Image: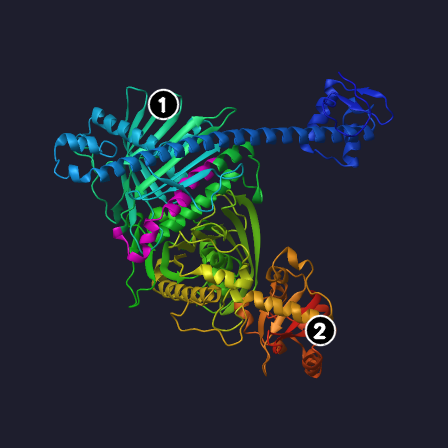
């Protein structure tokens, strides 16, 4: 046992767990039994209350000679030591990561130097060839050809067959080609836009330039051993969301300790407008002389006399060029991994407008290459932090749920016949495709529950899906709007029907209606993958549901997966996938996903300006025809295109198929119309000049209106509306102002044209629906009379202060406010543009 001096601080090299210090300067020694009792309590409760410490002394006789204050000091020192230990561990991990990143950067620098030397050599060679061209024009000898083409001539591949020796020859050739891409100069790599290496980055990411097909490469550090890394990456469906299945057709061992596998792989199509892809592959796993583990793959399509796989219906056979993973053990634990993906997706087989998706190395890097590193990092975090997170779920369980949602959505989008999907006849308009699945495997996969001892009545699933082209709408902004303003596009009755069909409670078939009532509550599950994806539970409160000719209020819970909401990411696919769940959120809850997927078709364009905010950018044209952003964004928006895919699934009873099909078709069409309306509002240019829409004269841009509002407030009231304007844009400061700021038009019947976030919350509306609310609608009779009598004063004096009172939200809820200020907003010509109101310290009554 040891003794320490008094004090509650934790000093460098301070006391061990077997001793504690007293405030009076005496030395106190602890027995191992006493330390064990204190450690047990510390693990259960690191910061016990005074009452809990006294209870510990009463329950443990061996601590009876210790005063509560001394126990308090022991816990303070114990927490401090734990904090120091965690910080030291964190710094060691950062140091290991920086060392590994430094090693990667040195290797990349060596590769670039080799590439420069190669280019210089080739430049010199071609210059000499050009100078000697007149002398060599008639030289057609074999020796001359070999000599002049020694740098880039590829020898003719000898015939390959399905024998072990033939497969090993293909495997060794694949290995050499892969290593030349992973660490050599076989492909010209350029740094991927927006991806900068650093201790907090996913790794060093590069994309190909000027090679066959599309290729991407990533190098990074993961906290897993090489064998575990290889095991995870070979299980492609577990981490690659677009992978439907990988079947091992044959496997054999090689004399050098390696393994050769023949694989058949299928990938989902990302939209309804293109067929799915499949691959016939050889995979070679081996260990290099330096101990590195290699897993490399390539297609067997073009091998002569080699093993073959016949074409499969509904799939286009794509080609994988030499790709794979180089995994090296890292000093201090973990692995350094090089990932190379090089494929040819046969772009000729899709409509021309979609071909950029199949020719984009950036999209390949984001959806496949970096996805592998993110998944490995997620697994590593789950191993080190296995504790439960949101709703008592462990990270691995939440990850499995997210994969279940994504897979269900992909199945709905693709509708493969081998899964039981059959297409219904069109109603003459081919904008929405309907499919029905009544196969037992589909219903068992849904795992529908029992109600009152009887099986669920729903015995079939209908899917309504469609794709649409969007222009000049950043996918991240549109997806965030769909997530945060569900009432703008969803129908509460159909939400209630879908939830009831899954939970097997009595329900009736709804008719799509515009709008909904009730509130949306987002309950985060604290689950994220490198801030790229998160899950949450959406609670739709008091949603309207028709039953027996009556509207019954119900609460609906949706499990929701959201990804691609970062505006600064280049070419990112954005997804919002959700499924109704039971309030218990049990592990065996049925999952029937629906949702949206938005994929940019111009992945090479610059990312949107980070200064844009969702709602201000979405509605500050303040006119009925659409919006325009500030000038800095208008120039960058260009003519961006993206494709949105929509898929909604409904469980139903077979005898109701015709009615459910009509409802689903009408509902998806209403969603398409809503999305088009929202996209028009979010578009920086209102879809350009293609639809002939123009903003009304005098309509300001977002930044301009915000500046007019603040300048006019300063002019009439003599004080600043915003504090610390210079720290961020006026637009952003006004948007986040704590008081409700609303603007209304100068018309005979004034309508609201703009509101900041607090204003939208107060009125319980969105910027898209704001222009349907008149000024008089939010005031009661007394408020209207006061406003009418004082309105001339606003126009003459420029401002007016209103006493506290009561107003109404768009949902009819009373709102109290302490006071309000109204002032005239002047434009650049000093003429009145609108009237601005600010409601101070408002709250719902």
Dot 2: few (<14), some (14–19), or many (≥20) neighbours within 10 Å?
A: some
Q: Are marks 1 and 2 in contact (CB under 8 Å)?
A: no
- Nearer to us in this view, 843 or 517: 843
Q: Residue at x 53, y 75 (%)?
A: 698
**Magenta span covers which residues?**
348-376
Task: Give the quarter of the image for residue 299.
Answer: top left
Task: Give the quarter of the image for residue 272.
Answer: bottom left
Is residue 428 something one can see in this rendering? yes
**Horizontal side of residue 131 vs 392, given as left or right:** left
Dot 1: few (<14), some (14–19), or many (≥20) neighbours within 10 Å?
A: few
Question: What count of labels does the image hold?
Answer: 2
**Residue linked to disc 1:** 288
Is residue 507 something one can see in this rendering? no
Whole-percent x, y for residue 612 in the image: 54, 58
Whole-percent x, y for residue 459 in the image: 37, 54
Q: Earlier in the sequence, mark 1 or mark 2?
A: 1
Q: Split into 4 quadrants, where in the image is the N terminus?
A: top right
């Amino acid at each position: 046992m040891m003794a320490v001096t008094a004090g509650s601080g934790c000093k460098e090299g301070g006391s061990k767990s077997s001793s504690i210090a007293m405030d009076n300067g005496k030395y106190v020694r602890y027995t191992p039994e006493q330390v064990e009792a204190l450690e047990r309590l510390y693990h259960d409760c690191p910061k016990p209350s005074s009452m809990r410490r006294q209870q510990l002394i009463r329950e443990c006789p061996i601590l009876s000679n210790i005063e509560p204050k001394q126990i308090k000091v022991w816990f303070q020192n114990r927490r401090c030591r734990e904090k120091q230990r965690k910080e030291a561990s964190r710094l060691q991990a950062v140091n290991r990561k920086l060392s590994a990143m430094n090693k990667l950067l040195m290797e990349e620098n060596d590769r670039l130097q080799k590439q420069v030397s190669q280019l210089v050599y080739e430049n010199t060679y071609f210059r000499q060839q050009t100078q000697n061209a007149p002398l060599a024009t008639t030289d057609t000898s074999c020796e001359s050809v070999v000599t002049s083409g020694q740098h880039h001539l590829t020898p003719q591949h000898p015939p390959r067959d399905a024998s072990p020796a033939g497969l090993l020859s293909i495997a060794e050739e694949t290995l050499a080609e892969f290593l030349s891409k992973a660490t050599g100069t076989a492909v010209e790599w350029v740094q991927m836009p927006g991806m900068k290496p650093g201790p907090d980055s996913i790794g060093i990411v590069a994309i190909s330039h000027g090679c066959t097909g599309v290729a991407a490469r990533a190098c990074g550090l993961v906290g897993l051993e090489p064998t575990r890394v290889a095991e995870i990456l070979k299980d492609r469906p577990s981490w690659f969301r677009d992978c439907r299945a990988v079947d091992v057709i044959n496997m054999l061992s090689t004399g050098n300790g390696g393994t050769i596998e023949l694989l058949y792989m299928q990938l989902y199509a990302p939209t309804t407008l293109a067929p799915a892809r499949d691959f016939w592959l050889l995979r070679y796993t081996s260990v290099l002389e330096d101990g590195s583990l290699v897993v490399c793959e390539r297609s067997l399509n073009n091998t002569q006399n080699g093993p073959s796989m016949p074409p499969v219906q509904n799939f286009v056979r794509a080609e994988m060029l030499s790709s794979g993973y180089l995994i090296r053990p890292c000093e201090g634990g973990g692995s350094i991994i090089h990932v190379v993906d090089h494929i040819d997706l046969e772009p000729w087989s899709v409509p021309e407008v979609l071909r950029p998706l199949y020719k984009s190395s950036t999209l390949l890097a984001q959806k496949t290459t970096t996805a592998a590193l993110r998944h490995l990092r997620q697994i590593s975090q789950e191993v080190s932090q296995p504790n439960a997170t949101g709703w008592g779920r462990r990270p691995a369980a939440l990850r499995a749920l997210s994969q279940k949602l994504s897979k269900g959505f992909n199945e709905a989008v693709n509708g493969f016949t081998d899964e039981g999907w059959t297409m219904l006849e069109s109603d003459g308009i081919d904008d929405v495709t309907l499919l029905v699945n009544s196969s037992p495997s589909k219903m068992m996969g849904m795992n529908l529950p029992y109600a009152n001892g009887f099986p669920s009545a729903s015995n079939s699933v209908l899917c309504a899906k469609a794709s649409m082209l969007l222009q000049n709408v950043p996918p991240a902004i549109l997806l965030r709007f769909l997530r945060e303003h569900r009432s703008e596009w969803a129908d509460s009755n159909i939400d209630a029907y879908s939830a009831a069909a899954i939970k097997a409670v009595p329900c009736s078939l709804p008719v799509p209606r515009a709008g909904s009532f009730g509130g949306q509550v987002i309950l985060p599950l604290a689950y994220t993958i490198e801030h790229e994806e998160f899950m949450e539970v959406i609670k739709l409160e008091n949603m309207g549901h028709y039953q027996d000719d009556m509207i019954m209020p119900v609460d609906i819970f949706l499990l929701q997966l959201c990804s691609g909401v970062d505006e600064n990411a280049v070419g990112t696919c954005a997804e919002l996938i959700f499924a109704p769940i039971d309030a218990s959120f049990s592990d065996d809850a049925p999952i029937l996903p629906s949702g949206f997927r938005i994929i940019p078709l111009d992945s090479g364009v610059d990312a949107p300006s980070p200064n844009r905010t969702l709602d201000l950018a979405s509605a500050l044209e303040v006119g009925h025809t659409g919006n325009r952003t500030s000038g800095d964004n208008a120039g960058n928006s260009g003519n961006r295109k993206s494709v949105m895919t929509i898929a909604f699934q409904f469980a139903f009873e077979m005898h109701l198929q015709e009615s459910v099909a009509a409802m689903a078709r009408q509902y998806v069409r209403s969603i398409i119309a809503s999305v088009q309306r929202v996209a028009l509002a979010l578009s920086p240019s209102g879809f350009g000049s293609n639809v002939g829409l123009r903003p009304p004269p005098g309509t300001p841009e977002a930044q301009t209106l915000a500046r007019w509002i603040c300048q006019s407030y300063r002019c009439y009231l003599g004080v600043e509306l915003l504090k610390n304007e210079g720290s961020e844009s006026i637009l952003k400061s006004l948007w986040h102002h704590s008081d409700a700021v609303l603007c209304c038009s100068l018309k005979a019947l004034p309508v609201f044209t703009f509101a900041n976030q607090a204003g939208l919350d107060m009125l319980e509306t969105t910027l898209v629906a704001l222009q349907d609310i008149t000024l008089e609608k939010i005031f009661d009779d007394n408020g209207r009379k006061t406003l009418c009598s004082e309105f001339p004063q606003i126009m003459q004096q420029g401002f007016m202060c209103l006493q506290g009172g009561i107003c109404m939200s768009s949902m009819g809820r009373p709102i109290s406010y302490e006071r309000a200020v109204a002032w005239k907003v002047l434009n650049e010509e000093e003429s009145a543009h609108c009237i601005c109101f600010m409601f101070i310290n408002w709250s719902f009554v």
